[in-house]
């Protein structure tokens, strides 16, 4: 009795002394767990995660019942009964101390662990244990049991940088928290006691013992029945380290977002739980990835094969000296298939083959690169080969996927054509392969040495729909889309031509395509520019000059309109003075800019003459699921500037569509967010805007109009003709009539571009070496870059209807002589129609009567399509 009284007095005194000194627990109501930065596509696909701690906080009701039961069985089965301190556990700890003289596990409840994890250290002292007990009482009086348990389940460290059980299920099993088996729940529930010692990766045997102990506790407590218990005990554990389940490959996008978030929030960007939703269209981003890689691999195939990755002696395998053949492999894996044909077998069918166990270990030493897969050749025939890949497949390499691999000599030279697969491959070669369009087949491939970029914008508001800065981000983090300052070449000419149209020139104005020599101190002593072909074509209409990409016409045109005027005019498109040299070489695109800059400029052509600003971050969700930022871009609205009384039906519909765009954006955002974010999202708007989200259109931030509708129409039609009749004819394979664009090739083919658009997308494709050097003979924009643009636009525009280019008022179509640009007479042969402003219609009639020249816009002659296409 005396001992009990003294103990009571001691505890009471300690309580009175320590309680005022305990940390305040009010923060637990509004605790901010460290959560990594996550980046998402517009429709919610995860792009990337940044931060040391892997954590996904959940609400109590989101945790599965089996997980809660497993944790309670392992850590504190009386949690919902005791007041924060389990007297039975404390008594066990005291008895242990009396019997052994050593401090052991102190019977810590989950509430006490929450107190320790949030406010105290992990040192084992009596003072810390008393503080822990008293804090547990305070917490129990302040929070509900469910709130306490949710804090524990979200906060606890579980090894492998996983904090909280939601992160642990992803790290160890690659599954969402509601998809685990009972055995897997028991495994992760056993981790808090010793995240390193009981870790199924570091110590699988000890972890299995701990798992079975937790299962036994669950059975004793009747959380599971005998059948479930026995089945769980018999279940092998398949834990391994899983990365975050990235749903969209866009690492260059992710890095752009990370850089911006760190600039805004500093180091807190990595722990503040920010979720950044970008403007990226997931399907278009995938199309961009494929298009860029296909284009760079295509370039590489034209320039020869540089050799294998290594060699593995198939006869040195420990178990057998018998050479592996495709017949043996197929007969072992799938006899019925082998009897029918030599076809690809599935992963499951080849998983257990002895050869593959050894081969897989060898291939795992080789890093993947973009979409290239390390592979081991195990059979070579005269016109085909078979290989085993690092992703556990058997693939067929047909002759048409091998014959390109002539030996590389230099960028302009390869050795003689191959006549047999044996000349290039032998059994045991370790190579890269890439899947082809033919089922079960792959290309022989190699790492491209050339670089590339693709940028695609929505011209109506500048949203970045897709962006790729290189073949493999992890090989080279240099983002060529926004960092590669390169000369745009002829892809810059449309800006010069647009400036000329706004200074009185017409699409039919005649400029001499003839030799010219300039004194050019800023360039050379004398400058003798030439066309790509080295030929001269005489008097040429502006439209034809742009179609044919005539250099000399562009230079004379710039000289006539004036360099100063041209630079002032072109800066309206978003270019800076630094990008625009003050000399005549500007006409040939001698400035220095990025694909991103050029996409910004071309968006003006695509949207009919309005300046928009590219943007990537659509909105940001911060702590407590509150939306803290939403972009409000300037948008194109052609009808908004007109008086209501002057709008016809079509214009009125366009205005209504544009005014509703913000409403649609809100609805799209809400569709990928949890329901409880709705009010947060709307809180970014004022009261009137919130009403209009549900009741009508919100006010628009209007994009600045920098081109008249007439000028925008004329340059659009001229660039459409580039695709119909000129250097961009390869784009006709897409099968659309609403495409426009321009090729670009710089001196010595150092840079290859295709810059094009329709009303829905403005897209730039670039190919070149990171350290500028010639791409090789005939590697023009039409050959090196246009295939990338075509592949992307074909997929990106699939299912989207063509939009008719409407002729604005003030323009008329007149029949002219293609040789002179003058009005055609009744006897003019091959006359064509051209658009003119009403006050610029030619007044003189041509004197030519029997014109034998067929104009490129009336009949495209294959032998004379262009000097810039092969």
Image (cartoon, grey):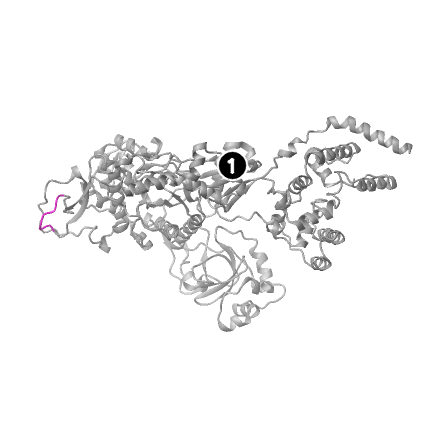
For the point 29% across and 31% down, the residue is: 568
Where is residue 132? Give x, y as percent.
Answer: 75, 34
Residue at figure coordinates x 42%, y 64% from the top left: 399
What percent of the width, then of the height, locates residue 107? 78, 41
Q: Quadrant of residue 158?
A: top right
Residue 703 seen anywhere in this rendered image of the structure: yes
In the image, the segment drawn in magenta is: 822-828
As drawn, which residue projects farthest toward the front? Answer: 695
Magenta stretch prevailing secondary structure: loop
The image quadrant where one finds the N terminus is top right
On screen, residue 354 versus residue 207, left or right, reads: left
The residue sitting at the right extreme is 2
Location of residue 358 with respect to 28 vertically, above or below: below
Q: Is residue 565 above or below residue 783?
A: above
Q: Is residue 90 left or right of residue 40?
A: right
Q: Name the spot of residue 608 as percent of width and height, x first.
A: 30, 40
Where is residue 663? Give x, y as percent: 42, 40
Whether 755 is among the magenta residues is no
The one of 287 and 590 positioned closer to us in this rendering: 287
Task: Give the structural element (helix, strand or loop) at label 1.
Answer: helix
Front-lying residue, 27 or 490 = 27
Above or below residue 648? Residue 443 is below
From the viewer's perspective, tell me whether residue 414 is left or right of residue 131: left
Q: Which residue is mark 1?
A: 680
The part of the image, by quadrant, that contains residue 153 is top right
Q: How many marks?
A: 1
- Would you say residue 200 is visible in this rendering? no
Given the current orientation, which residue lies at the most extreme bottom position?
339
Crowd rating for badge 1 (residues with CA inside 10 Å; few <14, some 14–19, many 20+): some
């Amino acid at each position: 009795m005396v001992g009990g009284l003294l103990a009571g007095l001691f505890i009471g005194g300690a309580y009175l002394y320590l309680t005022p000194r305990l940390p305040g627990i009010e923060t637990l109501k509004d605790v901010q767990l460290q959560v990594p930065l996550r980046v998402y596509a517009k429709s919610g696909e995860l792009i990337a995660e940044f931060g040391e701690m892997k954590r996904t906080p959940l609400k109590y009701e989101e945790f599965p019942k089996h997980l809660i039961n497993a944790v309670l069985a392992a850590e504190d089965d009386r949690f919902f009964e005791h007041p924060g301190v389990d007297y039975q556990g404390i008594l066990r700890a005291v008895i242990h101390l009396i019997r052994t003289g050593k401090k052991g596990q102190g019977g810590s409840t989950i509430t006490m662990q929450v107190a320790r994890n949030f406010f105290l250290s992990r040192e084992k002292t009596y003072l810390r244990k008393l503080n822990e007990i008293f804090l547990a009482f305070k917490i129990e009086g302040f929070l509900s049991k469910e709130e306490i348990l949710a804090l524990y389940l979200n906060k606890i460290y579980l090894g492998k940088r996983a904090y909280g059980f939601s992160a642990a299920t992803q790290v160890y099993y690659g599954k969402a928290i509601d998809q685990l088996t009972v055995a897997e729940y028991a495994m992760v529930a056993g981790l808090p006691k010793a995240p390193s010692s009981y870790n199924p990766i570091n110590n699988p045997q000890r972890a299995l013992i701990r798992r079975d102990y937790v299962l036994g506790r669950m059975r004793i407590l009747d959380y599971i029945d005998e059948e479930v218990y026995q089945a769980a005990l018999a279940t092998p554990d398949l834990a391994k380290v899983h990365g975050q389940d990235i749903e969209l490959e866009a690492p260059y996008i992710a890095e752009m977002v990370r850089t911006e978030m760190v600039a805004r929030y500093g180091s807190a960007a990595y722990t503040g739980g920010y979720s950044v939703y970008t403007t990226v269209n997931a399907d278009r981003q995938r199309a961009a990835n494929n298009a860029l890689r296909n284009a760079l691999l295509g370039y590489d195939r034209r320039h020869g094969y540089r050799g294998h990755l290594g060699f593995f002696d198939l006869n040195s395998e420990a178990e057998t000296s018998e050479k592996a053949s495709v017949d043996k492999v197929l007969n072992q894996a799938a006899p019925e298939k082998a009897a029918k044909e030599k076809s690809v077998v599935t992963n499951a069918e080849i998983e257990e083959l002895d050869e593959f166990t050894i081969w897989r270990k060898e291939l795992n030493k080789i890093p993947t690169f973009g979409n290239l897969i390390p592979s081991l050749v195990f059979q070579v025939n005269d016109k085909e080969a078979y290989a085993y890949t690092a992703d556990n497949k058997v693939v067929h390499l047909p002759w048409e996927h091998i014959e390109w691999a002539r030996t590389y000599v230099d960028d302009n030279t390869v050795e003689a054509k191959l006549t047999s697969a044996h000349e290039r491959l032998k059994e045991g070669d370790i190579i890269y392969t890439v899947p082809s369009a033919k089922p079960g087949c792959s290309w022989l491939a190699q790492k491209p040495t050339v670089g590339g970029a693709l940028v695609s914008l929505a011209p109506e508001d500048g949203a970045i729909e897709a962006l790729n800065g290189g073949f493999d981000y992890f090989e080279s983090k240099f983002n060529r889309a926004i960092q590669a300052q390169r000369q745009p070449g002829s892809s810059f000419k449309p800006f010069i031509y647009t400036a000329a149209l706004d200074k009185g020139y017409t699409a039919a104005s005649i400029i001499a395509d003839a030799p010219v020599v300039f004194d050019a101190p800023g360039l050379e002593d004398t400058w003798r520019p030439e066309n790509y072909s080295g030929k001269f074509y005489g008097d040429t209409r502006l439209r034809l000059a742009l179609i044919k990409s005539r250099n000399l016409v562009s230079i004379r045109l710039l000289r006539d309109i004036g360099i100063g005027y041209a630079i002032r005019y072109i800066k309206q498109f978003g270019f800076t003075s630094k990008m625009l040299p003050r000399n005549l070489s500007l006409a040939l695109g001698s400035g220095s800019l990025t694909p991103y800059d050029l996409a910004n400029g071309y968006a003006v052509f695509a949207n009919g003459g309005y300046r928009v600003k590219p943007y990537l971050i659509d909105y940001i969700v911060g702590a407590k699921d509150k939306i803290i930022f939403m972009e409000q871009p300037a948008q194109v609205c052609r009808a908004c500037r007109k008086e209501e009384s002057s709008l016809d039906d079509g214009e009125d519909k366009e205005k209504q569509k544009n005014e509703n765009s913000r409403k649609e954006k809100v609805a799209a955002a809400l569709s990928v967010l949890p329901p409880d974010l709705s009010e947060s999202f709307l809180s970014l708007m004022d009261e009137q805007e919130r009403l209009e989200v549900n009741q009508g259109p919100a006010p628009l931030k209007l994009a600045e109009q920098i081109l008249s509708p007439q000028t925008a129409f004329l340059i659009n039609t001229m660039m459409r003709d580039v695709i119909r009749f000129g250097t961009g004819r390869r784009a006709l394979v897409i099968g659309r009539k609403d495409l426009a664009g321009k090729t670009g090739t710089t001196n010595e083919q150092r840079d290859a571009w295709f810059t094009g658009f329709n009303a829905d997308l403005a897209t730039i494709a670039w190919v070149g070496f990171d350290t500028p050097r010639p791409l090789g003979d005939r590697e023009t924009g039409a050959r090196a870059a246009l295939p990338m643009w075509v592949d992307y636009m074909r997929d990106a525009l699939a299912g989207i209807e063509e939009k008719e280019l409407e002729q604005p008022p003030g323009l008329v179509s007149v029949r002219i002589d293609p040789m002179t640009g003058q009005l055609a007479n009744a006897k003019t042969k091959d006359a064509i129609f051209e658009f003119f402003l009403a006050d610029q219609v030619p007044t003189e009639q041509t004197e030519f009567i029997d014109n034998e020249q067929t104009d490129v816009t009336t009949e495209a002659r294959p032998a004379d399509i262009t000097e810039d296409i092969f």
